[in-house]
């Protein structure tokens, strides 16, 4: 029986270029890490175990996982292979994940069109580092991992604005927005007024970089 697992989480909004750049940094910081696509519920219902897409690059596995809207796992057991078996309750194919620590990149599905004329990045993204509660080294790894991630994303200097009026409904300047937004996602949103980092149809409002940041990115481009 496996021990209980704790995890550390960031809710994220990332453009594909953010994922590519972070993937390159991870390859340098953790050269022995491996990645695999987490099989979907539909894949695990088949008569045979699904083929596990795996490799040394987060970005390449993430690209392949987009076809299935699947999550990606990062782990540090270079010799790990899935030991498939049928779940006794559901009959679906399952396997134990790699030993802690490991990382799940979830719901990073790219762009959405929440309503005609509006483009947004899927706001459900999350990155979770799973740790053994008895090993402080796992938590140190999680802190190092998220410090590295912090070079590519920030949870501050955002505003929620009404569309199409542009009225600022809520400001996250100098305080957390509870979602870490990639620098490339910010640049993408700043390039046009109909682009949002997170758009809520019910309130017709979306998350955008602050005006100073938008002006800077437009100048850079």
Image: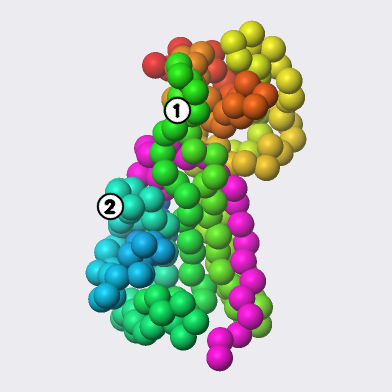
State the residue at coordinates (73%, 25%): 171
Residue farthest to the top? 165
Which residues fall within the magenta stretch? Answer: 1-22
Picture quadrant where residue 30 is located: bottom left
The image position of residue 85, as x and y in percent, is: 37, 84
Magenta span contains residue 28: no
Residue sitting at 44 percent across and 32 percent down? 112
**Residue at image point 27% right, 64% down:** 53
Location of residue 188 with respect to 86 vertically, above or below: above
Residue position for label 1: 113
Residue 98 showing in the rendered view:
no
Which colour assignment does the render follow? rainbow
Query: Does 125 sit above or below residue 70?
Result: above
User: How many residues crowd around disc 2 within 10 Å: few (fewer than 14), some, or many (20 or more)?
Assistant: some
SS type, badge 1: loop
Name the image quarter holding the N terminus: bottom right
């Amino acid at each position: 029986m496996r021990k209980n697992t704790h995890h550390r989480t960031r809710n994220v909004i990332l453009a594909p270029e953010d994922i590519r750049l972070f993937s390159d940094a991870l390859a340098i910081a953790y050269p022995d890490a491996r990645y695999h696509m987490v099989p979907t519920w539909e894949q695990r219902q088949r008569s045979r175990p699904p083929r596990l897409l795996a490799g040394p690059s987060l970005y390449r596995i993430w690209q392949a996982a987009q076809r299935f809207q699947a999550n990606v796992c990062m782990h540090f057991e270079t010799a790990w292979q899935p030991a498939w078996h049928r779940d006794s309750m559901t009959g679906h194919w399952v396997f134990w994940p790699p030993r802690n620590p490991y990382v799940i990149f979830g719901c990073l599905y790219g762009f959405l069109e929440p309503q005609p004329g509006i483009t947004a990045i899927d706001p459900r993204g999350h990155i979770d580092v799973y740790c053994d509660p008895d090993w402080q080294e796992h938590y140190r790894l999680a802190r190092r991992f998220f410090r590295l991630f912090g070079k590519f994303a920030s949870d501050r200097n955002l505003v929620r604005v009404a569309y199409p009026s542009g009225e600022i409904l809520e400001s996250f300047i100098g305080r957390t927005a509870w979602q870490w937004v990639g620098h490339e996602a910010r640049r993408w949103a700043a390039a046009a007024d109909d682009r949002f980092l997170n758009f809520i149809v019910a309130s017709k409002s979306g998350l955008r970089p602050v005006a100073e940041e938008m002006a800077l990115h437009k100048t850079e481009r």
